[in-house]
Image: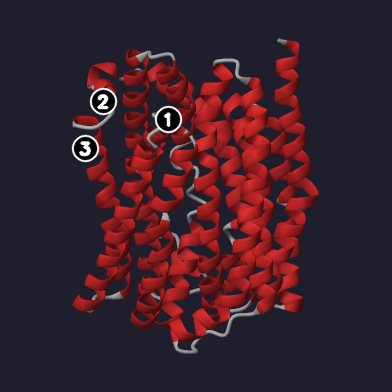
Amino acid sequence: MSRGILAALVGRGLYVVAPLVTIPISLQHLGASDYGAWSAALALTAITSFADLGLGVGLMTRLAAALTDRDLGRARVLVTSAYGVATGIVAVLLAALWGSAAVVDWAALIGGRGQSDENIVLVTLSVFLFNVVAGLIVRVQYAAQQVALSNAWQSAASLMGIAGVLAAVALDVSSPVFVLIAGASQTAVTVINTLWFFSRGGGRQYRMSPRAFNGAEGRALIGLGSRFLFITVLISLTMSTDPLIISHTASLTAVTEYAIPAKIFSMLATVVSALSIPLWTANVEALRLGEWDWVQRITRKMTLLSGGVVLVLSGVAVLIAPWVIRTWLGGRIEPSVVLMVGLGLVALVQAVAAPIFMVQNAAEVLRPQTLGYLLLLLILPAKWLVVSAFGFEWIPWVTGIGYCLVVWPAAWIGYRRVLRVRAGS
């Protein structure tokens, strides 16, 4: 597993570097207002994070168990059913999204106005919905313990995203078309990955077949996935809606001033993901085989490693980010130290909890973290008040402090509950 985690860190390197290339180009082409509209539209994906009903994580958890048991027949049923159900859901949501344009003022939802802002929102949400189906391949490859391969493909998608942005600028397209090309170019690589994996790669033995579709299995995946989904929605509402809050309490230009440093510090979330997500399926296998000592040992090790790595990287980012942003954007954005330290704090508190949550996810013990994230919703009005009174740079501090107060205790309670299952078995 350590090789897989290392490969994930290396393979996701391009994913981290890509924004360093695309943000200044995108900002120059779109302008501060349209770039802010795009950032706010991306925050709206928190509302559509329910789109796959949790099928992705449900599939990853159950598929990892089936592959551990070498039950390829069940693996085929799981994969086919998940893709079939996800495709149907996304088709309905896309039709509803574009049909709603006549009655919903999408531009107003992001604090903008005009047809261009509305089209940016519709295109952003459409690309996101297409990725619900295309992105299932990442869950499949993680379940198959092909972490390095998955991250290599994701790096290729990042490269294609850079190429897409450069092509859009060269063609001098409108802002909505720019957003479409930037997003769809990465989705295309994910689709190619899917076709290759199931035709020539490791998924040949359980590739999709219409005869393998099982509605009951799809409903079972939704049943499990909806529990993960609810947690995902809660996380999105509390942690991904900051640009929306800023757009309504300040301006779209302020969203850009927040979004640029936030984009840089979101790279730390990539590190956390690369370190922790492989633990999910590895823990599924270990728990299924009764390797409890390994689970506890690797959880302690990865909690220290994840927290330590992110702490160091956060410190480095706070020190060099002002110079990078000034050089990178020609002084158009002056980053706030208070904002950057707060963003580092958010990354750190999540990094410490992530390995502990991976054990609970693998064991399907979700109630403690669900309650923790429900309580975290209480910070939303606090964010609004803090931004209105003190400025948007304080918004991540509200998130970080709230996370420590309610989510950390929930993480520990859930972990102890999993260990009690061992004691009673």
Residue shown at 37% from the left, 72% from the top: 21
Three-letter residue code for mark 2: Met
Residue shown at 41% from the left, 65% from the top: 17
Q: Nearer the viewer, mark 3 or mark 2?
A: 3
Q: Residues within 10 Å of mark 1 (few under 14, many from 20)?
A: many
Q: Which mark is residue 196?
A: 3
Three-letter residue code for mark 3: Trp
Q: Position of residue 345 (x, y in %)?
A: 69, 61
Q: Does the rendering let one see residue 90?
A: no
Q: Quadrant of the C terminus?
A: top right
Mark 1 — residue? 143
What is the spatial separation of the Cα atoms under label 1 and label 3, in whole angstroms? 17 Å
Residue shown at 62% from the left, 67% from the top: 245
| Whether residue 358 is situated above or below residue 256 in the rendered picture | above
Marks 2 and 3: in contact by CB < 8 Å?
no
Residue 335 sits in which quadrant?
Answer: bottom right
Badge 3 element: helix
Q: Residues within 10 Å of mark 2 (few under 14, many from 20)?
A: many
Q: How many marks?
A: 3
Q: What is the residue that sits farthest to the bottom in this orientation?
A: 331
Q: Is 101 on the left or on the right of 323, as rendered? A: left
Mark 2 — residue? 208
The answer to which of 191 and 43 lies nearer the viewer is 191
Q: What is the residue that sits farthest to the top in this orientation?
A: 425
The answer to which of 419 and 292 lies nearer the viewer is 292
